[in-house]
Image (cartoon, grey):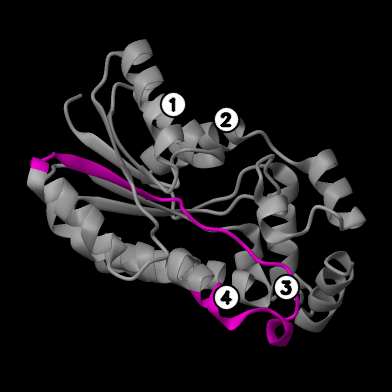
């Protein structure tokens, strides 16, 4: 396979696992994240182990114009891209009015604006293939409001809605669009969100958290099967169904209790 998969947030967690498993499938890789040293090490490892072409770009996608920078990087090198994975994102724990507005704006830029812009730029390239794919990484938080992580959950709900709408718009093309909605995953998410000291969340993550490799395997299976929504783990599927059946106010009270310090 000579085409490339472009992955944002590729140096750690789910993004890193997706990169490794796509390399195993003989996809060439374009890796994007903030950490150049981690990208350089990962690129060397994957290229050496799987004999695929791997290039990387260190970029902060929360910065204005970063998605355009990624696109121009791809155009400059004339890479043939058949798979886009919008994985980069993070959460912030705390009440909306008590958190820094600038930090929340950066989160929204990374979680929503960057993937929207990058998808817009990449669609013409993806359309050149007889079969192409887009995978947007959301969360089970997309299925309900989460007091204490209000904007994070809202941003993930946005990504789910964006994916489903775009999937319908592109149904007459050869581009399949899917949304990955994982529950707890054993990454550095809690530390980045400032939630490592919340006992209920930490305990749930330790008990129910999935390994990124497992999530990536399920994600790629669902992606290539052209599923609209991919929810790894039976408990997470049940939870997502429950949010549709139970009263919203009850779900919100439960979530607020979990995310309380």
Image quarter for residue 13? top right
Mark 4 closeness class: few <14, some 14–19, many ≥20 residues within 10 Å: some
Q: Which residue is mark 3?
A: 146
> Going from the N terminus, do you reach mark 3 or mark 2 first?
3
> Going from the N terminus, do you reach mark 1 or mark 4 first?
1
Q: CA distance from mark 4 to mark 3?
A: 15 Å
Judge depth for marks 2 and 4 and give the one in front.
Answer: 4
Mark 3 closeness class: few <14, some 14–19, many ≥20 residues within 10 Å: many
Q: Residue at coordinates 13% horizontally, 43% vertically from top-left?
A: 129
Q: Are marks 1 and 2 in contact (CB under 8 Å)?
A: yes
Query: Eyeballing the image, is 228 above or below 36?
Result: below
Image quarter for residue 187? top right
Which numbered circle lies on residue 20?
1
Which range of residues does the magenta coloring cover? 77-105
> Going from the N terminus, do you reach mark 4 or mark 3 first?
4
* Residue 94 part of the magenta segment: yes
Mark 1 closeness class: few <14, some 14–19, many ≥20 residues within 10 Å: many
């Amino acid at each position: 396979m000579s085409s490339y998969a472009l992955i944002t947030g590729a140096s750690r967690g789910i993004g890193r696992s997706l990169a490794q498993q796509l390399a195993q499938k003989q996809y060439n890789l374009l890796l994007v994240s903030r950490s150049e040293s981690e990208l350089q090490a990962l690129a060397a490892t994957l290229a050496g182990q799987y004999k695929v072409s791997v290039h990387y770009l260190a970029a902060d996608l929360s910065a204005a114009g970063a998605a355009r920078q990624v696109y121009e990087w791809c155009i400059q090198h004339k890479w043939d891209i058949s798979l886009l994975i919008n994985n980069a994102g993070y959460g912030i724990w705390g009440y909306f009015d008590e958190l820094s507005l600038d930090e929340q704006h950066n989160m929204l830029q990374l979680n929503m604006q960057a993937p929207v812009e990058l998808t817009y730029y990449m669609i013409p390239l993806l359309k050149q293939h007889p079969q192409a794919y887009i995978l947007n990484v959301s969360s089970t938080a997309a299925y309900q409001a989460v007091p204490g992580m209000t904007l994070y959950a809202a941003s993930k709900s946005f990504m789910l809605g964006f994916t489903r709408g775009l999937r319908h718009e592109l149904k007459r093309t050869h581009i399949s669009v899917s949304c990955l909605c994982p529950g707890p995953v054993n990454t550095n998410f809690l530390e980045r969100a400032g939630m490592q000291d919340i006992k209920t969340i930490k305990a749930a993550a330790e008990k129910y958290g999935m390994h990124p490799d497992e999530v990536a395997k399920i994600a790629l299976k669902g992606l290539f099967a052209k599923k609209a929504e991919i929810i790894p783990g039976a408990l997470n599927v049940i939870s997502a169904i429950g949010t549709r059946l139970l009263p919203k106010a009850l779900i919100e009270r439960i979530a607020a209790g979990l995310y309380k310090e």
